[in-house]
Amino acid sequence: MPAVSFQNVSKTYQSARGTFKALDGVSFDIEPGEFFGLLGPNGAGKTTLISILAGLTQPSGGKVTVNGHDVQADYPSARRQLGVVPQELVFDPFFNVRETLRLQSGYFGIRHNDAWIDELLEGLGLADKAQANMRQLSGGMKRRVLVAQALVHRPPVIVLDEPTAGVDVELRQTLWQFVSRLNREGSTVLLTTHYLEEAEALCGRIAMLKQGRVVALEKTSELLRRASSNVLRFKTDQSLPDDLLVHARVTGRVVQLPAHSALEVEQLLARVRESGVVAEDIEIRKPDLEDVFIDVMGGAAQAAQAEARS
Ligand SMILES: Nc1ncnc2c1ncn2[C@@H]1O[C@H](COP(=O)(O)OP(=O)(O)OP(=O)(O)O)[C@@H](O)[C@H]1O
């Protein structure tokens, strides 16, 4: 039985400007013990899909199960299987950290949970903050409590929605060490993130969403292997001619261009020189998940345009 199963899930929002399809026939399964990444650009539908999984949003169609429990028909059982770390920081400011975690345990009907609460505090670098009042904590510390709160009932499926947006390196490392440990011990993890290098390092399998549809669903290693080209990378102070610019990923002085062969590298460099651009620190590297992401999203956009034209 899959840990999570999305079966033809759709979601249409009604607004003043009419109807909007945020999810359109999303189907995939996550197997027990997987570390699974859900990626997509802003507005692709990731948070909507997770809200449906968590029982916070009603789908317009389709079905979602967690360890066999339907998130709508059997919400309490499905919810018990899930530990959801939401994007926003929402807390009752009157409690301290330990009280907050005891309260959350009580919500799941769990008493005498202090041994596990201590383990969570330790694992998430909160041990010295157990007595601190929630309103005294920094944003990063609050986020750690949010993670601990999601895990108090030892859920077999952990859902992390952009857990590292705007958090410092130390918290990222603490979080990933702890979540990876839980994954090694058998927990299933579903992660959404905009940090593609994190997804590449952590996720065994990845689904990419674009405009509410799954446009890639593959093992991470397979996605990287299938990437069609290597990347020519150099630095320059000048702007590229338009014919190169359309294919380039430009970040400040750094220019990256896909190159399928040694001949293409030579041709690209010749074109760079010919246009008067001075390239420094030239290198050729293997594609990373960001290259694949851009490739898939661009390809999906072209396919959608072709479909619209036909
Ligand atoms: N309550 C709502 N009413 C109307 N439209 C909504 C509502 N919630 C989300 N949307 C729209 O649905 C689309 C998908 O939003 P969603 O938040 O799921 O995307 P996302 O992939 O999580 O994006 P991000 O990476 O920015 O968090 C967006 O276009 C958004 O504007």
Image (cartoon, rainbow, N blue to C red):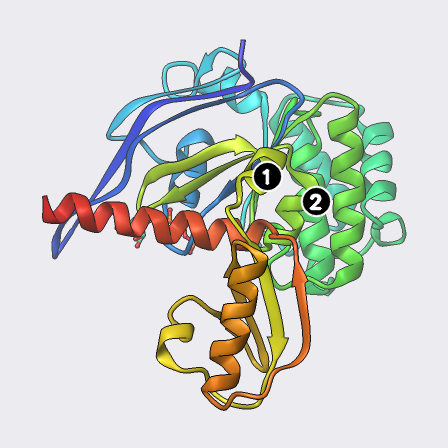
Is residue 108 at least partly visible in the picture? yes
| Left or right of 288 on screen, residue 40 | left
Residue behind mark 1: 225
Which amino acid does the dot numbered 2 rest on? Ala
In the image, is residue 82 above or below residue 309? above
State yes or no: Cβ of the residue under disc 2 lies below 8 Å from any atom of ligand 1: no
In the image, is residue 128 above or below residue 234? above
| Left or right of 306 on screen, residue 197 | right
* Nearest to the observer: residue 146 or residue 9: 9
Mark 2 or mark 1, earlier in chain: 2
Q: CA distance from mark 2 to mark 1?
A: 15 Å
Residue behind mark 2: 201
Tell me which corner region of the image, top left, top right, bottom left or bottom right, holds residue 247. Answer: bottom left
Name the spot of residue 111 as percent of width and height, x first. 74, 23
Quadrant the C terminus occupies = top left
* Nearest to the observer: residue 160 or residue 77: 160
Is residue 159 at least partly visible in the picture? no
Density class for disc 1 (Cα within 10 Å; few <14, some 14-19, many ≥20) is: some
Which amino acid does the dot numbered 1 rest on? Arg
Q: Determine whether label 2 and label 1 are within 8 Å by CB.
A: no
| Left or right of 234 on screen, residue 21 | left
Tell me which corner region of the image, top left, top right, bottom left or bottom right, holds residue 62. Answer: top left
Name the spot of residue 236 as percent of width and height, x first. 59, 85
Tell me which corner region of the image, top left, top right, bottom left or bottom right, holds residue 137. Answer: bottom right
State yes or no: Cβ of the residue under disc 1 lies below 8 Å from any atom of ligand 1: no
Q: Which mark is residue 78?
A: none
| Left or right of 182 on screen, residue 86 | left
